[in-house]
Amino acid sequence: MATYTANITALYEDVVADLIPYYDNFVLLPNPSIILNSYNISGGVGNTMKIPVTNAWTSGNSSVGENTAIIGNADQDFLPTSVSLSVTKRGAATLISEESLEDGGFETVRNAVVTRLSRSIAQATDSSGMNLFASGSETALTDISGVDLTNDSGLSNADLTGADVSLVLSPEFGAYAAKREPTVKMFNDVDKDNYQMVATVRNGFARVRTGFGRAVIASNVIAESNTTLRASLDMFSTSVANLRAENAPTDGAGFYVAVVTPAHELHLAKELNGVGGISNGAIGTVAQDLANQALLEGLIGQAIGCRFIRSNNLPRDLASA
């Protein structure tokens, strides 16, 4: 991408305010409510770290007689393993002519570009993390078969012509590490009389316990008319039940987190509409009347057992296998 005087002139004739971003998307990672295990390894050597993971414990001996040996009858083998986490460099850049800065206002243009580049690498981080959580690889998914987390939707690939992937996660499911915090650098090229602006970050993700995450794979059509292909509260309840069966830890308030796509959000909103739960089709909106707010908090929070968060960075519009 390159920014020249003509680009700035096309945006506005008179400089009166900051440039308005094209769009602003939710960036979720890193977030302690989603990823509890976050590490800063900027002071260390190398680009890979190992995260120690303990094995599951077994039930103790429930009936130990008096003066009877416990060792040998209720042994607990502590066999820690490790998960490797490697960081990746992510970047975004642009060229800005001196004339663009002069005509558009140095602070206005520079700040707008810094914001754009920072959000660009943040979104790259988010998308990579969601892909890795769903499939074990940061590579962008193109097909439903690439998702290797257990699918709790009850739908087969043959049922769907296109799909979005939502995730239900324990805070202990994944890990995040940062080797370099987001950095934006600006260099002057005197030969071309322009500036190079480059934003970089070095970070990475790992799945610590794959069994602590579940997938809901349902239709990617926002206005899906076939109710059997929509994401439903029952699907997310099933994920929560399976996580509880795995003894997957919750957050401090006893919740898992469900990260949903915009299509799945509307599917759930339509389901809640049937009982007067949501009138505007947005789970994230809390400006509801008292009865509706109580329904959302009671039904989703207590019965479902997870907090819902919307993200555009989940695997979306996947082809059927």
Image (cartoon, helix red, strand yellow):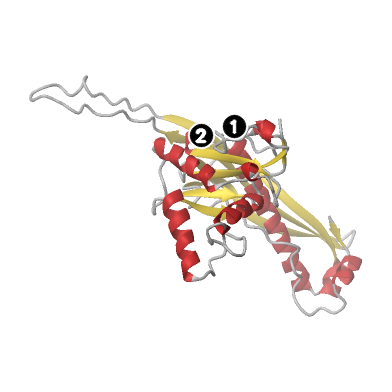
Q: Which residue is mark 1?
A: 148
Q: Name the amino acid, label 2.
A: Thr
Q: Secondary structure at mark 2?
A: helix
Residue closest to the far front: 274
Q: At x 66% / y 32%, what residue is drawn?
A: 157
Q: Looking at the image, do the residues carrying marks 2 and 1 touch, with CB atoms under 8 Å apart?
A: yes
In the displayed structure image, the side of residue 298 where residue 16 appears, left or right: right
Q: Which quadrant holds the N terminus?
A: bottom right
Residue closest to the far top: 72
Q: Residues within 10 Å of mark 2 (few under 14, many from 20)?
A: many
In the displayed structure image, the side of residue 7 where residue 211 appears, left or right: left
Tell me if residue 108 comes above or below residue 189 in the rendering. below
Q: Which residue is mark 2?
A: 210
Q: Nearer the viewer, mark 2 or mark 1?
A: 1
Q: Sequence order check: which comes first, mark 2 or mark 1?
A: 1
Kindly report the distance in space between the C-alpha atoms of the residues bearing marks 2 and 1. 9 Å
Estimate the x, y position of residue 97 in percent, counting from the top left.
86, 64
Confirm whether residue 207 shows in the render: yes
